[in-house]
Amino acid sequence: MKTRKWINLAAMAGLSLYLVIGAAAPAQAMHIAEGFLPVQWAAFWWAVSLPFFLMGLRSLTRITQQNPELKLLLALAGAFTFVLSALKIPSVTGSCSHPTGTGLGAILFGPSVMTVLGGLVLLFQAVLLAHGGLTTLGANLFSMAIVGPFVAYGIYHLVLRTGHQKAAIFLASALENLLTYVTTSIQLALAFPAASGGVWAAFLKFAGIFAVTQVPLAISEGLLTVLVWNWLQTYNRNELQTLNLIKQ
């Protein structure tokens, strides 16, 4: 047991080091930068995202009232998202690539809760780190804190039916990362259609550029999430049992 613990810690440290080194180049934005979207599109994504955020507040309130002992695990899920999404690689003009970290929280608490935690992460990074922006917060919220967590939750429960929990966690985390950037590519393509080929051509351009950095980042994030899960099984077993994620 002790040997396995040290192997997990070493693997987590190695993957974390890779993500930090791989994202060491400076960037000026997280997802879509402040003022980059036309006003009408910025307002549209705010309108789409707010109902999900309000629904997430209700879910978060219910969890903390029914199981106050889960607050530390909620904080860990938020911190995991904050740290991973702060590691940026410059990509398309006005945007960047990075891990997202929302898959773990979506598996633990459901996608609605991660809409709130992800939204807070995006807000803090926009205000304190100048990553992303307030006008584009609705668009970034939709891609990273709504689409990503809902994809992770769905993939996890779909693959879990095969009986392979670790595979479900890996695929949920990796695919939510990729689908976050597919969504960002769609958002950018809608706002800036190509002169030749329109929205579809613009989407292929944005998605193709993102894929160069995002595919290896998604794989790395999936592996790191599995290692964090192994750590949680050792040190937060009671909380996972409360959430019915592992057997008694």
Image (cartoon, grey):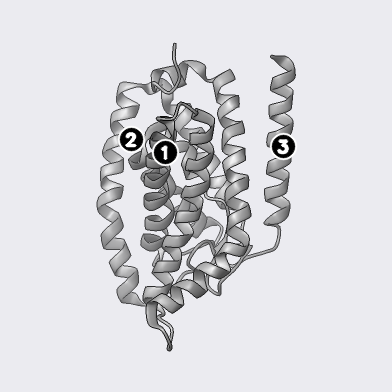
Q: Which residue is mark 2?
A: 60
Disc 1 crowd, CA 10 A, few/some/many (<14, 14-19, 20+) = many
In which quadrant will I find the N terminus?
top right
- In 3D space, how far apart are the residues under numbered discs 1 and 3 (Cα atoms)? 23 Å
Which amino acid type corresponds to the residue marked 3 in the rendered image?
A: Ala
Which amino acid type corresponds to the residue marked 2 in the rendered image?
A: Leu
Q: Which residue is mark 1?
A: 106
In the rendering, at what x and y percent does residue 39 appear?
A: 33, 76
Discs 1, 3 touching: Cβ within 8 Å? no
User: Looking at the image, which is closer to me, 71 or 15?
Assistant: 15
In the rendering, at what x and y percent does residue 5 appear?
A: 69, 21
Q: Answer with left or right where residue 88 lies relative to residue 157.
A: right
User: For residue 210, what is the image quadrant?
Assistant: bottom right
Q: Which residue is mark 3?
A: 13
Residue at the top extreme of this rendering? 248
Tell me the SS state at disc 2.
helix
The earlier-in-sequence mark between 1 and 2 is: 2
Disc 2 crowd, CA 10 A, few/some/many (<14, 14-19, 20+) = many
User: For residue 41, what is the image quadrant?
Assistant: bottom left
User: Looking at the image, which is closer to me, 247 or 53?
Assistant: 247
User: For residue 96, what is the image quadrant?
Assistant: bottom right
The earlier-in-sequence mark between 1 and 3 is: 3
Decide if residue 226 is in sight here: yes
Residue at the front extreme of this rendering? 162
In the rendering, at what x and y percent does residue 43 appear?
A: 30, 69
In which quadrant will I find the C terminus?
top left
Discs 1, 2 touching: Cβ within 8 Å? no
Decide if residue 35 is in sight here: no
Q: Look at 41% across and 79% down and name the residue there.
A: 192
